[in-house]
């Protein structure tokens, strides 16, 4: 997703003053040619806005809210639901928590804590969408964003989602507008307004049965993905063997 280059330059002047584009790019870790191309095309990527904002020590959400497509982003911040927070815990950490609880119960010892991996894990987008899913959420998002359902599905399978689709999904689901941007890795939990220990509290508050069911669902999804990958590998191997 992009914002107007004209408005970006106005915003950049307001926050960076007379600092040159070259200096801004160096601080933000952006190639000067990349920014130049975006300005010439008249559209600047939201990733560029976020990078510049971080380099200047500005809140990313507040910076994005300066632009028309994101005007309500800052006011749309809400704490994640328990399901959303759990969705940003990696499969291995969920399984580790379940095993630690079982071990503690069986041996009558203190439960070992789980140190959580970063929230943007290998299936974080799908897990978040499953956590906020209302009736036909994916179909509604595709219609609202005028995107083919198969293209949306391809993004989800690849564990990515554009900022526009992540925000639209959150809007339709009635959750915090920044929460999907955590799932995509565009924002950190802190940048999205999450409490520092939101995921840990959600994990601690989840029942054994809830965690077991969630892990079971995740493993089922993983199993289907592995099966598809194996089938594709076998088909490719067969083609090469037939070609001699």
Image (cartoon, rainbow, N blue to C red):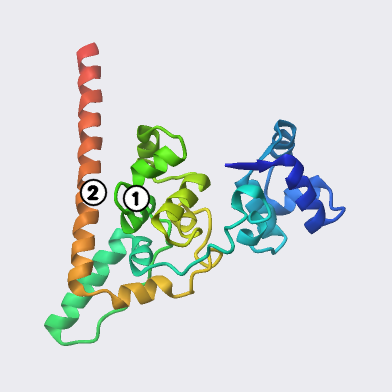
Q: Vertical placement of 98 versus 125: above or below? A: below
Where's residue 214, x and y in %? 23, 62
Q: Residue at x 41, y 44 (%)?
A: 141
Of 49 and 29, the residue lying toward us: 49
Question: Is the C terminus in the top left, top right, bottom left or bottom right quadrant?
Answer: top left
Q: Residues within 10 Å of mark 2 (few under 14, many from 20)?
A: some
Identify the secondary structure beneath mark 2.
helix
Of 111 and 170, the residue lying toward us: 170
Residue carrying label 2: 221
Where's residue 151, x and y in %? 39, 34
Mark seen at residue 54: none
Horizontal arrangement in the rendering, residue 118 relative to residue 203 (left or right): right
Where's residue 84, x and y in %? 37, 63
Horizontal arrangement in the rendering, residue 42 relative to residue 74 (left or right): right
Image marks 1 and 2: residues in contact by CB distance under 8 Å: yes
Of 173 and 121, the residue lying toward us: 173
Of 168 and 54, the residue lying toward us: 168
Horizontal arrangement in the rendering, residue 225 relative to residue 157 (left or right): left
Residue carrying label 1: 126
Q: Residues within 10 Å of mark 1 (few under 14, many from 20)?
A: many
Horizontal arrangement in the rendering, residue 18 relative to residue 228 (left or right): right
Q: Residue at x 79, y 49 (%)?
A: 10
Q: Vertical placement of 187 versus 85: above or below? A: above
């Amino acid at each position: 997703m992009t914002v107007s280059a004209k408005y970006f330059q106005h915003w950049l002047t307001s926050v960076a003053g007379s600092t040159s584009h070259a200096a801004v790019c160096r601080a933000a870790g952006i190639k000067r040619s990349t920014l130049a191309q975006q300005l010439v095309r008249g559209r600047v990527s939201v990733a560029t806005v976020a990078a510049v904002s971080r380099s200047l020590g500005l809140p990313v959400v507040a910076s994005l809210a300066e632009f028309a497509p994101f005007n309500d982003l800052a006011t749309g911040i809400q704490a994640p639901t328990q399901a959303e927070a759990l969705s940003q815990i990696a499969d291995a950490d969920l399984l580790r928590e379940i095993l630690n609880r079982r071990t503690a119960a069986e041996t009558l010892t203190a439960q070992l804590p789980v140190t959580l991996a970063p929230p943007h894990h290998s299936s974080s987008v799908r897990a978040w969408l499953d956590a906020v899913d209302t009736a036909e959420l994916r179909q509604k998002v595709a219609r609202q964003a005028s995107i083919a359902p198969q293209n949306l599905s391809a993004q989800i399978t690849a564990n990515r989602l554009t900022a526009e689709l992540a925000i639209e999904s959150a809007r339709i689901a009635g959750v915090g507008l920044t929460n999907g941007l955590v799932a995509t890795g565009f924002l950190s939990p802190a940048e999205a307004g999450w409490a520092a220990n939101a995921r840990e509290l959600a994990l601690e508050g989840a029942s054994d049965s809830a965690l077991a069911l969630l892990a079971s669902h995740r493993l089922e999804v993983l199993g289907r993905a592995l099966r598809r990958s194996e089938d594709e590998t076998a088909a490719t191997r067969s083609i090469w063997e037939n070609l001699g």
